[in-house]
Image (cartoon, rainbow, N blue to C red):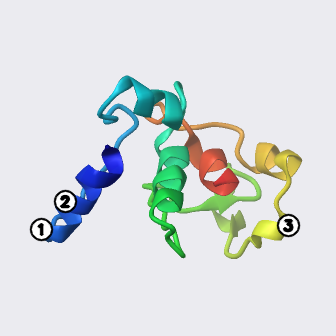
Amino acid sequence: MIQESIRTCLDQGILPIVNENDPLSIEEIDALGRGGDNDQNALLIAQCFRAQDLALITNTNGVYGNPSDPLSRITKIHSQDLSDDMINELCSGKSTTGTGGMASKLRV
């Protein structure tokens, strides 16, 4: 059902924005996962459409080796180098308004 809705929007030249509270039915809420976040949901939707790429947007300036040092921003991270321990070390917190934070983006 959500795939049909998104296709209809795209066919009409509309780029839909999907948030974690937007599923159209209980089945879709269960499929997306209760308590998930928008980054995880974006990945599920990208997979549903067999997308080759997925861009996640944030209002932060990136990932920092030391969050208190603005000069320690990491400019390149290879996905094969990421481990849960590394993500947890780099991403100790999340915004007060978000649910997943940078850790969720790196895991996706």
Left or right of 59? Residue 101 is: right
The image quadrant where one finds the N terminus is top left
The residue at the point 56 percent across, 39 percent down is 100
User: Is tag 1's residue or tag 3's residue first in the polypeptide sequence?
Assistant: 1
Q: Which residue is mark 3?
A: 81
Neighbour class for label 3 at 10 Å: few (<14), some, many (≥20)? few
Disc 1/disc 3 C-alpha distance (Å):
40 Å
Secondary element under disc 1, as helix, strand or loop, is: loop
Residue 6 appears in which quarter of the rendering?
Answer: bottom left
Q: Residues within 10 Å of mark 2 (few under 14, many from 20)?
A: few
Q: Are discs 2 and 1 less than 8 Å apart at CB?
A: yes
- The CA distance from mark 2 to mark 1 is 6 Å
Which residue is found at the position 52% from the left and 25% from the top?
Answer: 34
The x, y position of residue 84, in whole percent, is: 83, 47
- Foreground disc of the pair 1, 3: 1
Spatial separation of the CA atoms under disc 3 and disc 2: 38 Å
Q: Of label 3 and label 2, which has the lower sequence position?
A: 2
> Residue 62 placed where, x, y %?
58, 62
**Could you tell me residue 43's position as x and y percent?**
54, 55
Residue 9 vs residue 63, the one in the foreground: 9
Find numbered disc 3 in the image and state the secondary structure of the residue it sits on.
Answer: helix
Residue topped by disc 2:
8
